[in-house]
Image (tube, grey):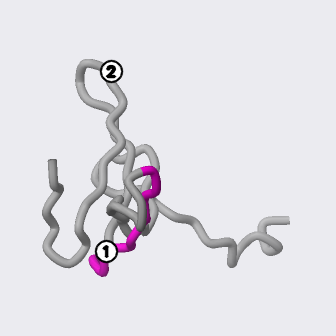
């Protein structure tokens, strides 16, 4: 039975993150009228991750994969 699952991919979440996945980021810009808005993708590559702090709060974060910075 173990041979059947020998090639199964296992992923490890790095840096103590509960979940992480590659994701870009978008910004909201004014549209053609004041009532409309337009979502525009940024070109930066990113990583979304969820971490739990020492006070047991969950934090949803985005990190720029090119620079390694986490914007506020």
- Binning the other alpha carbons within 10 Å of mark 2 as few (below 14), some (14 to 19) or many (20 upward) gives few
Q: Residue furthest top?
A: 55
Q: Position of residue 68 (x, y in %)?
A: 16, 68
Q: Which of the pair 69/15 is nearer the observer?
A: 69
* Residue 30 image point, x, y percent: 34, 61
Which residue lies most toward the right here? 1
Label 1 CA crowd tier, 10 Å (few <14, some 14–19, many 20+): few
Query: In which quarter of the view is residue 29 placed?
Result: bottom left
Q: Is residue 14 above or below residue 59?
A: below
Going 25% across and 72% down the picture, which residue do you hit? 65
Indicate left or right for 67 with 31 as reference.
left
Q: Residue at x 40, y 64 (%)?
A: 31
On the image, the x and y values in percent for residue 7 come to 68, 78
Where residue 9 sits, quadrant-wise, is bottom right
> Residues in magenta?
35-44
Magenta-colored stretch includes residue 72: no
Residue of label 1: 42
In the rendered image of this protein, does residue 61 appear above or below residue 32? Answer: above
Rendered image quadrant of residue 67: bottom left
Q: Which residue is mark 2?
A: 56
63 displayed left or right of 6: left
- How far apart, in angstroms, are the residues tagged by discs 1 and 2? 32 Å
Task: Name the spot of residue 59 as percent of width and height, x first.
Answer: 32, 36
Q: Height in image: 47 above or below 35? A: below
- The disc, 1 or 2, on the residue closer to the chain's N-terminal end is 1
Mark number for residue 60? Answer: none
Task: Name the residue rendered at 43%, 58% in the picture.
Answer: 37
Q: Does dot 2 land on a helix, a strand or a loop?
A: loop
């Amino acid at each position: 039975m173990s041979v059947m699952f020998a090639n199964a991919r296992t992923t490890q979440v790095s840096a103590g993150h509960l979940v992480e996945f590659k994701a870009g980021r978008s910004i909201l810009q004014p549209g053609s009228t004041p009532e409309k808005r337009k979502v525009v993708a940024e070109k930066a590559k990113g990583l979304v991750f969820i971490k739990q702090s020492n006070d047991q709060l969950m934090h949803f974060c985005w990190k720029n994969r090119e620079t390694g910075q986490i914007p506020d």
